[in-house]
Image (cartoon, rainbow, N blue to C red):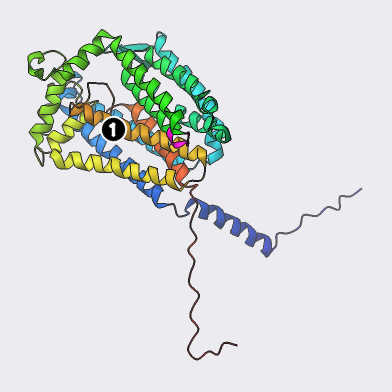
Amino acid sequence: MADTTRTRPATSTDEARRGLAARVSLGRVFAPVPSEFLLIASTALLLTGFGVVMVLSATSATSDSTDGNPYDAFIKQGVFALIGIPLMFLASRMPLKFWKRIAGPALLVAILFQLLVFTPLGITNDGNRNWISIAGIQAQPAEFLKLTLALWLGFILNRKKALLGKWKHALIPAIPVALLVMGTVIAGKDLGTVMILVLVLLGGLFFSGVKLRVFVLPMVLAIGGVAIFAVTSPDRMRRIMSFLNPDCLADYYGDCYQPLHGIWGLAGGGLFGLGLGNSKEKYSWLPAAANDYIFAIVGEELGLVGCVVVLVLFALFAVGAFHVIRKTDDLFVRTVSGAITIWIVGQALINVGVVLRLFPVLGVPLPFMSQGGTSLISVLLASGVLLSFARTLPRRDRVLPSPAPSPGRVLG
């Protein structure tokens, strides 16, 4: 029997519909974004670019004397920036349900990744075993615990939002899982990262809307735990005591060596600095010039003006993130955004406080700017999550006023 089915020829109506669908899809890609999106994205890009330039300046002198290539550290940092920036904008395109779906699996993968530091892949650095080396590439797995813990806290607290008034539901399983995550880092003796994870936990609980009396308990436990962890380590206690020592010059060649040179670098820059690339401390005087003390190099080369610019960029980043928190109606978005903001801005303030000798040396990098690919990619991914959340903010439709009737028109 012959097949009588005929293919219906495409009509002009079908072509118009396909064209309309293509225009709608293209319009979604280039749709206007909220001001919060632009503020977060622009500050993240500026800080990253600023950081790459400062890494080049801080490492060019010592790199030439070690491996003969003064641009090696700069190239590596630039490569990580070229990887992290597209990942940030890719993350910004992910829908809200994607982040909720991967929150649990992502935290599990990050914990397993962190446990690799206790395998033969692990590396001990300054008494901390918190690094791994694979095929010559070093990474710090704990950096990804910050973002994944923030996502998981938002997911679990959002599921229990109707029960957050009861302390058992507000703290369980959030506190036990957070302690497990911190335990994998404490085992490597990295107090600085543990403190940032504490900020992530407290930020998530605070912005989830738990009652103040419920919030106080984990805050006291966190402060007590960090204090006990510091007291039980002779090395950390020695550094803390040197920080409290008013006559630090007496221990110049000991624990006061790096903090003193950090302060001298800031003081030597004055108001406008010595000029980009003209730092004196980077010539092996300041051991962690490109890492934890890169803010001191900014102050020495660009002066007080450069330091203020960096702080203003972090303040603008915080403003954009807090606008997302304030405008959203979604508890998951508010919790994760709060945890990420407290992490990045809090870590920046701690790093600057260490350079200014307001805090003891904690080994906490300056987000976006310090040398380190793992840290840079993690904060750029976290910024991508904030950008994704910014796209979900409710848009206020502008109500246009009705046109006034013309004088000659008679209203009937």
**Is residue 83 inside the magenta stretch?**
no
Frontmost residue, 127 versus 76: 127
Q: Please name the residue that numbered disc 1 is placed on.
A: 348
Quadrant (top left, top right, bottom left, bottom right) of the C terminus:
bottom right
Image spot of residue 60 (x, y percent): 17, 28
- Whether residue 404 is visible, yes or no, is yes
The image shows residue 199, relative to residue 26, as above or below, that is: above
Spot the residue most to the front.
213
Frontmost residue, 227 versus 110: 227
Query: Residue at point 10% right, 18% down?
Result: 248
Image spot of residue 3 (x, y percent): 86, 50
The image shows residue 100, relative to residue 124, as above or below, that is: below
Query: Residue at point 38% right, 11% down?
Result: 187
Q: In the visual, does 252 lie left or right of 387?
A: left
- Whether residue 141 is visible, yes or no, is no
Image spot of residue 152 (x, y percent): 50, 29
The crowd level at tag 1 (other Cα within 10 Å; few <14, some 14-19, many 20+) is many
SS under mark 1: helix
Q: Main secondary structure of the magenta part?
A: loop
- The residues colored magenta run 206-210
Query: Which quarter of the figure has residue 261?
Result: top left
Query: Residue at point 47% right, 22% down?
Result: 175
The image shows residue 274, relative to residue 76, as above or below, that is: below
Frontmost residue, 365 versus 321: 321
Query: Residue at point 13% right, 38% down?
Result: 303
Kind of residue sitting beneath label 1: Ala
